[in-house]
Image (tube, rainbow, N blue to C red):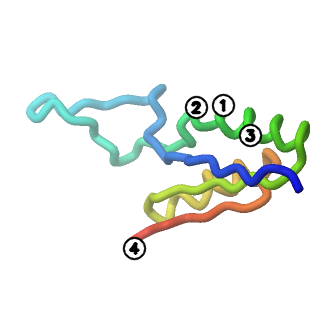
């Protein structure tokens, strides 16, 4: 039978490259590449270990703009069975 595991994956700005608007104090996203949240990658790795031990399937779920497809392709490459992108665009 196995487990059916869903892992939430968030597409976030790369924190190694941070630019702050000096007037507003907010993050400037233009020109900053996005990555899968590193903490979410830890969750994916744990889910894959559980799948290996007990069987089943791992699904990655992300609510993000269409550009997050790249991040979902990355976790599929890690061994996730299915990836779902929910977007209003």
At 74% from the left and 33% from the top, the residue drawn is 46
- Disc 4 marks which residue? 89
* Residue 42's disc number: 1
Q: Which element carries disc 2, helix, strand or loop?
A: helix
Residue at disc 3, secondary structure? helix
Q: Looking at the image, is mark 3 or mark 4 earlier in the sequence?
A: 3
Q: Secondary structure at mark 1?
A: helix
Tag 1 and tag 2, C-beta contact below 8 Å: yes
Q: Which residue is mark 2?
A: 38
**Disc 3 designates what residue?**
47
Instruction: Pinpoint residue 52: horizontal percent, then vertical percent.
Output: 90, 40
* Total count of labels: 4
Q: In this rendering, is residue 80 above or below 54? A: below
Q: Nearer the viewer, mark 3 or mark 1?
A: 3
Quarter of the image with the N terminus in it: bottom right
Q: CA distance from mark 4 to mark 1?
A: 28 Å
- 78 left or right, relative to 22: right
The residues bearing labels 2 and 3 have C-alpha atoms spaced at a distance of 14 Å
Task: Tell whether 24 sits left or right of 18.
Answer: left
Q: Nearer the viewer, residue 34 or 60?
A: 60
Density class for disc 3 (Cα within 10 Å; few <14, some 14-19, many ≥20) is: many
Query: Which image quadrant for residue 44?
Result: top right
**Label 2 to label 4: alpha-carbon separation:** 25 Å
The image position of residue 60, as x and y in percent, is 65, 54
């Amino acid at each position: 039978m196995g487990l059916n595991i869903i892992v939430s994956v968030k597409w976030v700005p790369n924190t190694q490259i941070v630019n702050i608007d000096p007037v507003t104090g907010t993050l400037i996203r233009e020109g900053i590449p996005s990555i899968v949240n590193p903490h979410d990658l830890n969750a994916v790795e744990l889910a894959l270990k559980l799948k290996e031990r007990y069987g089943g399937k791992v699904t990655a779920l992300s609510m993000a703009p269409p550009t997050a497809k790249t991040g979902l392709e990355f976790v599929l490459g890690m061994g996730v069975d299915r990836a779902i992108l929910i977007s209003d665009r």
